[in-house]
Image (cartoon, grey):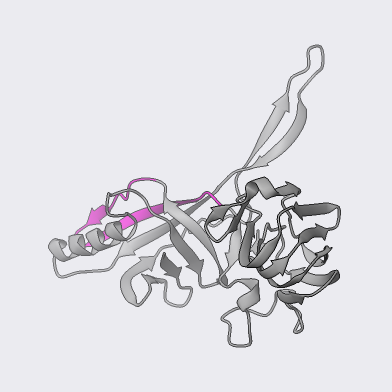
Amino acid sequence: MNFLYVSDDFGVTWYDEDHFNLIVQPGNKNPLTPDTSEVLVNVAGKLGVIRFQSQIGGRSLVIPLALPFEDDQYNTQIKAREFARFWTDGKGRPKDIWLRFGYDPDVFYIVQKSTSLDIERDLMLGFLQLALFAAEPMKQLREYAADIDFDSEITWYHDIRFDDEFVFTMTGNTTVEVNNFGTLDVSPVIQIVGSFTTLNITIGDQTLIYSESLAAQTLTIDCAKFAAKVGITNKNNQVSGDWLELPVGVNEVAFAGTGMNFTVTFIFRPKFL
């Protein structure tokens, strides 16, 4: 997946090592919260409405950009074509891009362009309003929690503890601590490599039950996608109970079962408003 980085140093936008050299203009729209909609109910004979619930939608972003001065309009058009191609796949459809801002460097949005890229030309300059939409409205950490070390390119204002662990060895009933140091609950991928006869995993009042034994294999439970697989074989019919979430903060995760001899990894990116 391609990256787009909006710098707060020089107002220059680029991806990977190839520079677009686009100048960020005033009027950047990056709201602190995603779009929401209200579900309202009218009750006969009652004034006003009853607010039933709020639903979180996507997040809309707008970045005003300018194509810098070129020798002629032809070169400006070449730059514009390169930028348009960056946002589309081989069939011309919008593709997912990781978007980062210089003032929030260790998190990203997954965005697509939400409108056509209309350039307003003025002599050898070009201006455009880059309208983007993030269907997943929350920011995600650049690295998986389990991959973070002292060389990671993240800021240390997060509630990370030096002794946080996300990989554990299980040989019997055990309770471990898993720190979701984001500001939002996350649904992790739980990867188990090894063997067990029976297995229950409990977080708070949530319990996931896996009813088939595992023998020197890899079981992947993707709680966000409601999917369990051994290798490439679907095992959803072996899962009952709850698809687990990690609430914000330090969670006690209890493993109970028989014949347990495996390593378990909690794979997730902490999420932020």
Let me know if residue 133 is in the magenta part.
yes
User: Which image quarter is the N terminus in?
Assistant: bottom left
Q: Nearer the viewer, residue 223 or 58?
A: 223
On screen, residue 98 above or below 89: below
Asked if residue 218 shows in the view, the reply is: yes
Q: Which residue extends farthest top?
A: 45
Q: Which residues are magenta?
A: 115-136
Number of marks in picture: 0
Let me know if residue 23 is in the magenta part.
no
Q: Which residue extends farthest bottom?
A: 150
| Image point (58%, 87%), residue name | 151
Asked if residue 247 shows in the view, the reply is: no
User: Which image quarter is the C terminus in?
Assistant: bottom right
Q: Residue 4, percent across and down?
A: 42, 66
Question: Seen in the image, is 20 located left or right of residue 162?
Answer: left
| Image point (31%, 74%), residue name | 18
| Image point (76%, 31%), residue name | 51
Q: Residue 94, percent across and down?
A: 36, 50
On screen, residue 254 above or below 88: below
Question: Seen in the image, is 248 located left or right of residue 19?
Answer: right
Q: Quadrant of residue 257?
A: bottom right
| Image point (76%, 53%), residue name | 208
Question: Seen in the image, is 133 located left or right of residue 124?
Answer: right
Question: Seen in the image, is 256 located left or right of residue 213?
Answer: right
Q: Residue 163, percent across and down?
A: 77, 83
Q: Quadrant of residue 155?
A: bottom right
Q: Nearer the viewer, residue 89 or 232?
A: 232
